[in-house]
Image (cartoon, rainbow, N blue to C red):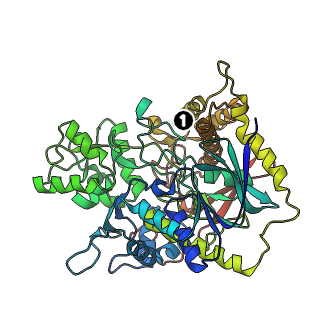
Amino acid sequence: MKHSVQHISTDLLIIGGGTAGCLAAIEAKELNPDVKVTILEKANIERSGCLAAGMNAINAYLNPGETAESFTKYVRYDACGLLREDLVLSQAREFEYVVKKVESWGLPILKDDKGNYQPRGRWNIKINGEKLKPIIAKKALDMGVEVINRAFATNYITENGVVKGAFAASTKKEEFYVIQAKKTIIATGGAAGIYKPNNTADSRHKIWYSPFNAGAGYAMGIRAGAEMTSFEHRFIALRTKDIISPTGTLALGFGAPQVNANKEKFMQTKFAHVGGEGAPTPYRVYGPTKEMKEGRGPCYMDTTHLSKEQAYELKKSFLDMYPDIVLYWAANGIEPDQEPIELQGTEPYIMGGHNQAGYWIDPDRKTTLEGLFAAGDVAGGAPFKFVSGCFAEGVIAARKAITELGEVEANSASENLDVDALAEQEIDRVFGPLERYVEGQTGVTYEEMEGRLQKIMDEYAGGVSSYYEMSEPRLKIAEKRLKQLRSQIPFLVAKDTFELMNVHEVIDRLDVAEVLVQHLLHRKETRWPAYQSRTDYPERNDMQWLKFVNSYRNQEGEIQMVERPYEQIVPGNRYLPR
């Protein structure tokens, strides 16, 4: 079977056209309009990424009286005392710049009668953000950014540890891309679909994080030998039952406390020592999970104190980002002022936007692979990014990439790089499942492998069914089962190019899962309850584990663990929010 091959040359390749990718592209073109910037996007940049459906708030902003230092103190507290303070500080210093920039493109930000942004808590400002993604996508296109839509990245093009672009395949036809670039920014999402979700069957993709974020950016870095950090700092969202809509809107916007089946405000009483309702985010999942495990569930967000008018405003607030819950309430005769809203924890996700799993980077967002930068969910070390932090990281990475493009040509195409030979190898790997498919004959489908992966991770690596708990014996079983699963990759088949994308997504998830299990094994403490609950090491241990757990895959394919020191930059108690 003959595959069409497109060769593309660009100055700056950005993989992932979400918020971080689009902001990086726009900043690059503003800094140097003559630079050729190319975005590679699996979907279509107009409605792609985690925020494709919109937002009702910018969740990281320095409201009056706050500073980059006070923000870093809070994020450090929320991350249970361990994070890259240099990265958090640098992104916080860009919040005002990026938010005002996007507002100037047409994003509606709510203001009071004096023209000030309307806050929602310490770090939030209210927006009408249903068209957030189309607004920034249009700006990128208006700036002359070239976009390749409907193509998924498969691997980096590398030479002696230097990234010189990427390979990609179309989701619509048998077309392969060889994209050579002087600099590359990876701005894909994190990884969903590694663990079995709460919702099953036809609703299995009704999850909190975008189901299309399959960890490709992580997996390409892992395969290329990049150093990764903090995969064990998983993210588990506390969300409404079944519909998986945000509880932050209920808590921050409408003052709803958590209660158990006995109507006890358990966070306020049992977790007062870590902040009660304002406890670090892991505890807000750990608290109700513990209540349910011990027989006091279900748990709820208690909205019964709301007036009719407030309940109406609550429904309106969900329409900018999660209208499904309003439809669900209407269909089931639920009025939030009359009954509390049941909640649940989601399956775990691996991401660098809420937590800090991702590439190990320097303050300029350079990875350990020369020529490669990371921004947004795929960049590690700096949690609490949300939309504005992803904006900021895209901008920071673009600035350094443009500076380096102007300094040297050392990372330009090399005469010694046999890109055609590398492309042939990658074509064989990428299209192999399509070539193997014969109607009526057996093979392993992506759904079968995905189901097996999720079952292994759920039962042995701290999923929903085990109340997010794990131990060394169970993690060792996960390690063994994942190796067995890897042996089935040569039998994967795909009947069309869309299934081919799904096949490579599950391979990427497997790469991420294997690294995750090694991280979970290596950190012998419980620093983030629920996110990383070790039953064999149930306490936090600052004496031995106030440090980063990193990893890289060597040339033999083995995962090597590395420990990196923590550096405190902002003075103060690391376990207090101020």
Inspect this view and state whether residue 557 appears. Answer: no
How far from the left and from the top, in percent, is residue 134? 43, 60
- Rendering coords of residue 476 (x, y %): 64, 37
Q: Is residue 488 above or below residue 513?
A: above
- Crowding at mark 1 (Cα within 10 Å: few <14, some 14-19, many 20+): many
Q: Is residue 313 left or right of residue 148?
A: left
Residue located farthest toward the left when viewing the structure as drawn: 308
Q: In this orientation, does residue 429 appear? A: yes
Give the residue drawn at x 55%, y 78%. Answer: 30
> Which is more toward the observer, 281 or 436?
436
Q: Which residue is mark 1?
A: 454
Say which of 20 and 567 sits in front: 20
Kind of residue indicated by mark 1: Gln
In this view, 541 is above or below 445: below
Q: Indicate the position of residue 303 as horizontal and vertical percent values.
A: 19, 50
> Compared to 475, does 246 lie above or below?
below
Q: On the rendered image, what quadrant is the C terminus found in?
A: bottom left
Looking at the rendered structure, the secondary structure element under dot 1 is helix
For the point 54% across and 43% down, the residue is 536
